[in-house]
Amino acid sequence: MKAIVCEKYGTPEILQFKDVEMPIPKENEIRIKIHAAAVTPSDCSFRRADPFFIRFLYGLRNPKFPILGVEFAGEIDTIGKNVTLFKKGDEVFGISPRRFGTYAEYVCLPEDQPVFLKPNNAAYDEAVGLCDGALTALTFLRDHANIQTGQKVLINGASGAVGAYAVQLAMYYGAEVTGVCSGRNVELAESLGAGRVIDYTKEDFARGGQTYDVIFDAVGKRTYSECKGSLTPQGIYLSTVPSGGAMLSMLRTSKSRGKKAVFTAAGLKQKKENLAFLKELFEAGKIKPVIDRRYPLEQTSEAHRYVETGRKKGNVILQIRH
C-alpha cells in the first residue's frame, strides 16, 4: 500500500511517499481502507519532535511510529475473527492516538478504540474534520469547563480547526460566544454563530474590560497570566498547547476555589460515545464542517508546510484515493 513515512524528525521534506507492507488485522482488530485523513498542528509537532518531550514518548532518536496521522474516515474492508462491533463495509470515522498510521491507504485498529459509524449525511472529508477539532473542543468545553447555558465564553483562534468547532459547540450548549481571530476570518466566525467577534490585529481582548466564565485558547497563543484578569471569579482558562507555563499555571490553580487553568491530553481521552454524540449533532445540522484545503496523499509535505504557516481555517484534509 501507499503511505507517508517519517523515518526521522525534521522539516516537511523528510516525509516520504512510498510503498509499505499492507497491515493484517489481529483477531480483535478491524482494517480500515482510509478515504480521508487530517493534517493538524499536532502532526507537525510530532514530525519535528517539538516540544522535545515528544521524543521520550514516541522515540528518542527516530519516530517509533514512522507513519504519522491520527484522524481518519474510511471503510472497513477486513475484520478479525473475534470482532463483534463492526462488519465489512461499515463506513467509519475515528482516531488512532496511540499508534498513529492514518497517512496511509489502510490502518488496523482494535475494535474497542475510538472508532464509530460516520454520520450518514457526511462525506469522508467532512467526517474526518469532526475528528480534527470537534473531539478536542468537546472534551475541553463539556468535560473540563462544564459549559452551561448563559455563560460567557471566549474562543481565541475561532477560525482554526478546534476553534471553529468550539464556537459551534458553545452555541449548542447555550453560551454567549465571543470569537477572536484575524480580520479576514471575522465573517467565518460570525457564520459559525459567534455573537461577537474580535479582530486581534485591532483589539486585545485581555485589555477590553470584559470578563468571561470560560476563555478557551484553542491555538495556545495567550497565557493564563495574560487572561486571568478577563476571567470571572470562578472562571476557567483552557489551553490546547502543553507549554511549560500552561502546566505550571494548571498546577498552581488546581486546588483553587476560584479561577483555574486547565490542560488535558484530549486525544488520549476519547471514546466511542463522543464520536456517537458528534455524529448525532452533524446529522441534525447542529454543527457543520469547515474545510480549508484538500491535498492528495503524495502532497502531504505541502500540506504540512501550509499548516505550519498558522493561517489555516478549519481543517486541512488528505484525500486518499483508491
Image (tube, grey):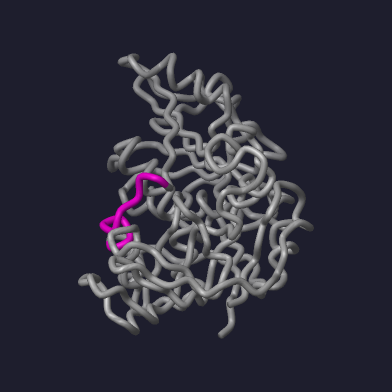
**Residue 170 percent location from the top left of the image:** 38, 48
**Left or right relative to 134: residue 307:** right
Q: Is residue 26 magenta?
A: no
- Which residue in the rendered view is the most extreme toward the left? 84
Q: Which residue is drawn at 66% across and 35% down?
A: 203
Give the quadrant of the C terminus. bottom right
Between 28 and 48, the one lying in front of the other is 28
Q: Does the magenta stretch include residue 273?
A: yes
Q: Is residue 161 above or below residue 238?
A: below
Q: Residue at x 44, y 32 (%)?
A: 263
Q: Is the magenta stretch mostly helix, strand or loop?
A: helix
For residue 209, which quarter of the picture? top right
**Residue 290 percent location from the top left of the image:** 54, 64
**Left or right relative to 135: residue 66:** right
Which range is magenta?
Answer: 268-276
Q: Residue at x 30, y 64 (%)?
A: 111
Q: In this view, does 114 lie above or below 89?
A: above
**Residue 257 percent location from the top left of the image:** 30, 15
